Amino acid sequence: MSDLAVTAVRREAPMDHPLVQLTLVRFREFLREPEALFWVFVFPILLAAGLGIAFRNRPADVLPVAAVTRSLAEALGRDKLLNVRQLSASAAEEALRAGKISLLAEPGPGGAVVYRYDDTNPEGRTARMLADAAIQRAAGRADPVASSDRLVREPGSRYIDFLIPGLLGMNLMGSAIWGMGFAIVDARRKKLIKRLVATPMPRPYYLLSFLLSRLALLAIEVFAVAGFGYFVFGVPLRGSLASLAALCVLGSLAFSALGLLIASRVKTIEAASGLMNAIMMPMWIVSGVFFSAERFPAALQPVIQALPLTAVINALRANMLQGAGLAHLGPQMGVLGAWLVVCFALALKLFRWG
Amino acid sequence: MSSPLPGAALRVSHLRKAYKDVVAVDDLGLAVRPGECFGLLGPNGAGKTTTMEICEGLTPADSGDVELLGMRWISDAAELRQRLGIQLQETQLSDKLTVAETIRLFRSFFRRGPEPAEVIALVQLEEKRKARVGALSGGQKQRLALACALVGDPDLLFLDEPTTGLDPQARRQLWDLIERFKSAGRTILLTTHYMEEAERLCERVAIVDRGKTIAMGTPRELIASIGVEHLVEFSTGGSGRAFDAAPLTRLDGVRDVREDNGALRMQVTELHRAVPALLDELTRQGVPLTELRTHSASLEDVFVALTGRHLRDE
C-alpha cells in the first residue's frame, strides 16, 4: 500500500517524461534558429529549382557553331541541331577560345573545309559530326539508307530526375551531421552537457532525443525535396513510399551516428565545423550528387561505393527512378547499416560528457 | 522529507586529485553537518571547484573518500543524483529556451520536487517566465541556475561561486534566496572568494589554499584565532613635521604598527582605547590627521595572516 501511495504522489504526465522534454528542447532550439531552417528546408529546394531550370531550358542538342564564309554558314544552317553564326576570322577565333561556340568551320586549300574544335569536349565532337554531315550533304552526298527519328523523352531519364535523389541524399547527410554536431558541441562548450549529467537524467535519453527529433524533422525534409521534384518537375516516385521512407530513415540514422561520432570529443565549434566539412566535402564530390560516381577511376570505386552518401544516393535513385524495392537494395542497406552500427558504438565509447 | 542523518551530511577525507603536472587537491578533508551552510573559501586555483566536482560525482578523485548523506558515488549514484542540487560555476543554459521551459526540463529529471511555477516564484522570476534565457540579466541567469538546482527539492545543495560577476544588488538578492533555503533546514556547500559572502551565509568555513584545508571553523573562531580584532589605518598631513610612530607601539592594546603605502596600519585588540590614545599622541606631536579608518578583522585578514597573500590579487 505504501508503495502505491508513493507512486500516486509522483503524478507523471506523459509530457513531463524526460525523453519527451529533451526532444521538445531539440525542436525548440531548431525552430528558433532561422539559419538552420533555411539550410535544411529552403536551400535544397532553391538548388533543385535552379539546376532544374538551367538544365531543362536547354534544348536537347542545339550546338553553337560559326563559319567564316557565307557558303559554309548556309551549308551548316541546314542542320536544325546547329545554331550557326557567320563571323569574321578574328571574332570567330575569339568566340572559339571563349567557349561561346563549339566548332569553327573555315575554308581550307583546294575547296576543302577545316574544322577547329576541342576534341576533349563531347560537344565539340558532336558538332564535328553534325557539321561534316551537313556540309557533305549540301555538297551533294546522298545517304544510301533512308532513316527517320522517333524521340523518347520520358520522365526518369532527364537530368532533374538524376539530380533530385542526389540532393535528397545530400540533404539527409547535411542536416543529420550539422544538426547533431553543432548542437552537441555547443552544449559541451557551454558546459550544458556537464550540467545535465549532474542531474538524474538518464544519459542515453540525451542522445536518443537527438535521434527522435531528427526523425521527425526528416519527414518534413524529405517531403520538401522529393515533393518539390514530384510536383514541380514530375520526377517519378516509382518505388513504394514505404520503401522510400525506410531508406531515408536508415540513411538519416547512419549519418546521425556519424555526426555523433564527429561530435563525441570536440570542444569548439570551429574544430567541429572543420571536421564536419573535411568529412562531408569529399562525399559531395565523389558520391554522385551532381554527376555519376561511376566517372571516377575503377581503382577508387570500392572506396566510393563504401561511402554512406554513395550508398544512400544509389539506393534512392534505384528506388525513385527504377522502382527498386528494399529486397534489391541489399548492398546499399548493408553499407548504411554498417556505418550506423560502427559509428554509434564508437561514439558511445568516445563520448565526452564532461 | 528524509530522516535525520547521523553524523555529517558530507564527509571528505584525504582527497587527492592531480592533473598532468598540477596537484589540484592535496590530502583535503572536511565535514559538513546536516542543516548548515559550509563555505570553501580560497583564492582562484586553490582547488575549490575540483573538490566540489569530486563531491558532485562529476570528476573522479585519484584517492580519498567522499561520503554524502550516508552514501557513496560508487554504490548509490542514482539515489544521490536525485537528492543533490547542483549549480556549476560556468554553465550557460540554452539561450533559445524560455525560463519556464528550462525549469520544466530540469524538473522532468527528478522523481519529486516542487512544481515548476513554485520554483520560478521562489527565485522571483515570475515576470520573466516566458522570456528567453538569452534575454536575462546576469543576476536573473544566476537565479535561474539556482532554480535548476532546487527543482529536485535537494537535501544537499552545492553552489560553486554563485555570485561571481554579479553587481552588489543582484548579489544581495541571491544571498536572500540562499538564506531562505537555509532556513528550511537544508545543507549547503558553497565556494566563494568573497569573504563577506562567506561571513554572511556560512555557519562554518574551510579556508583552502593550494589544495589543502589550512583552517576550519566558524568565521568568528577563525578571526579570533589570529588574535587581532580590529585594524586602524590613518594618514598624517604631508607638510610639517614627520610623525613618530614609535610611541604608539607602547599604547594599551596595540599589537603591531606598520607602514603600508604611506599610511600607518595598527593591529589593535580594543578599539575604544586605542583610538583616543592615537588621537592624544597626534595632538601631543602636533601632527594633523588627514585620514582615519577602522575595520573589524575579517576572513580576508585570516587568509593574509595564514598565507601572507591576499584572497584576490587585484
Image (spheres, coloured by chain):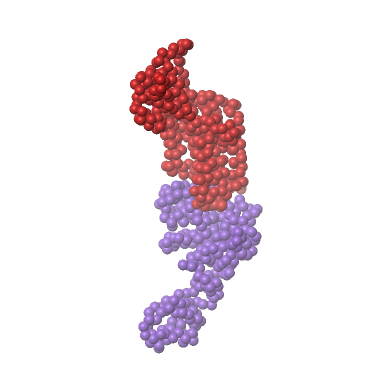
Chain colours: A red, B purple
Q: In the rendered image, which quarter is residue B66 located in?
A: bottom right
Viewer can see residue A215: no
Who's the residue at 56% across and 40% down the image? A257
Q: Is residue B312 above or below residue B79?
A: below
Front-most of A249 and B39? A249
Q: Is residue A52 above or below residue B62?
A: above
Q: In the rendered image, which quarter is residue A345 located in?
A: top right
Q: Is residue A122 above or below residue B24?
A: above
Q: In this view, does B121 lie to the left or right of A206?
A: left
Front-most of B21 and A291? A291
Who's the residue at 46% across and 77% down the image? B260
**Residue A32 in the image: x percent, y percent?**
43, 43
**Residue A42 in the image: x percent, y percent?**
43, 36
Front-most of B60 and B142? B60
Front-most of B11 and A238? A238
Who's the residue at 63% across and 65% down the image? B27
Q: In this view, does B123 lie above or below A128?
A: below
Q: Residue furthest front?
A: A110
**Residue B310 in the image: x percent, y percent?**
50, 70
Who's the residue at 48% across and 24% down the image? A157
